[in-house]
Amino acid sequence: MRGPWPTPPVTPSASPAPARIRIVALWLSILLGGAAVAQAPPTSNTPAENSTTEQEPIAPVPPPPPADPRKLAIGERLFFDSRLSGAGNLSCNSCHDIHSNGARPDDGHVSRPFDTLTVFNAALSFRLNWEGNFRTLSAHIESSLENPVNLNTNADEVVGRLNADPAVVRQFQAAYGGAPDRENFLDALVTFEKSLVTPGARFDRWLGGDASALSPAELEGYALFKSLGCIACHQGVNVGGNLFQRQGVFHPLVKGSPQIVRVPSLRNVATTAPYFHDGSAATLHDAVRRMAAAQLDRTLTDEQVARLVDFLQTLTGNFRGSPVSGAQP
């Protein structure tokens, strides 16, 4: 299922260095309201005077939205329920493990054309999937149900199975005033997925004024992240997830299609290896180096890569009071 592409940001295939600088400056002026491309590294691990969340291009992850606890409980039950798959052998959590990084453990149970994106903070992105072809969580859920390489069923079939379970019917009646149907089934899952946010990252604590949250090396990495132009595509509450971009603006980044993808969120990125839609970057260091070359026409030193990774590691948030962790094989 593919939708029409929105017009992507200006992404020339080749350009001399001065043009590159003008392009990055233009992106930043549009996205950040005219903020300067380069920002001097902080001299200490204390936020600059008058530094506030409103003045930074990244916003902290908010807490989960208010929700009826009965609907949340149903949504969580469904998220782990293998009756959502045609063969009865997979659940949503099989590919989006919320006990680790919200993505697929490396168990190789099925072959997929795209690396699995984490479900954590997905509700904060403007579109869903690598191709960005879903605008709502409910549409994405239905696609996952119907996809033959995912759950291979449909909402109506699942609702039929749920109605055969008296305990589930009672739970729906208590929360929704009626037995499971297509609408309340999807609503329960959407309600639960909206709760899968990961606030409390160290970087968010720094944004909130905690001067001790980041080290000088991490702050240097953040300053570099902004001055190089990474921030042009990775900003906002999800540090990405809010625009489309070409893969390989100046040099090839990945093999194969699609050429244009929804920019992924960098929230919890240190826990979600491998990277890129084809999973071709095994480590965060490799991904950073390749991104700089392909998207910014920059060859980074080992020190620059290390500082950028230091910063990216501060974007790991907390789920239910514990830091998000990497997937276990």
Image (cartoon, grey):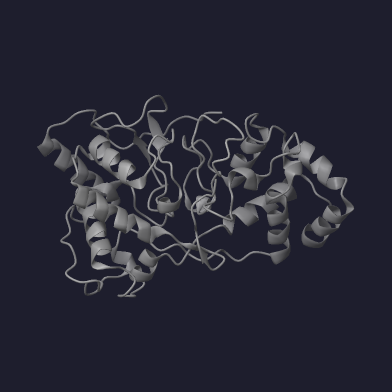
Quadrant assignment, res 205: bottom left
From this viewpoint, which residue is outermost toward the left? Answer: 18
Residue 40, percent from left and from top: 15, 61
Residue 169, percent from left and from top: 85, 53
From this viewpoint, which residue is outermost toward the front? Answer: 329
Residue 252, percent from left and from top: 29, 28
Tell me if residue 2 comes above or below residue 22 in the rendering.
above
Quadrant assignment, res 46: bottom left
Evaluate whether residue 249 shows in this view.
yes
Residue 144, percent from left and from top: 62, 37
Which residue does the image show at 27% across and 48% down from the upper left?
230
Tell me if residue 61 comes above or below residue 9 in the rendering.
below
Tell me if residue 40 comes above or below residue 46 in the rendering.
above
Left or right: residue 295 versus residue 319 is: left
Question: In this view of the protein, which residue sits in the foreground, 282 or 194?
Answer: 282
Which residue does the image show at 36% across and 64% down from the upper left?
203
Q: How many marks?
A: 0
Evaluate whether residue 33 shows in this view.
no
Name the quadrant of the C terminus: top right
Name the quadrant of the N terminus: top right
From this viewpoint, which residue is outermost toward the top? Answer: 256
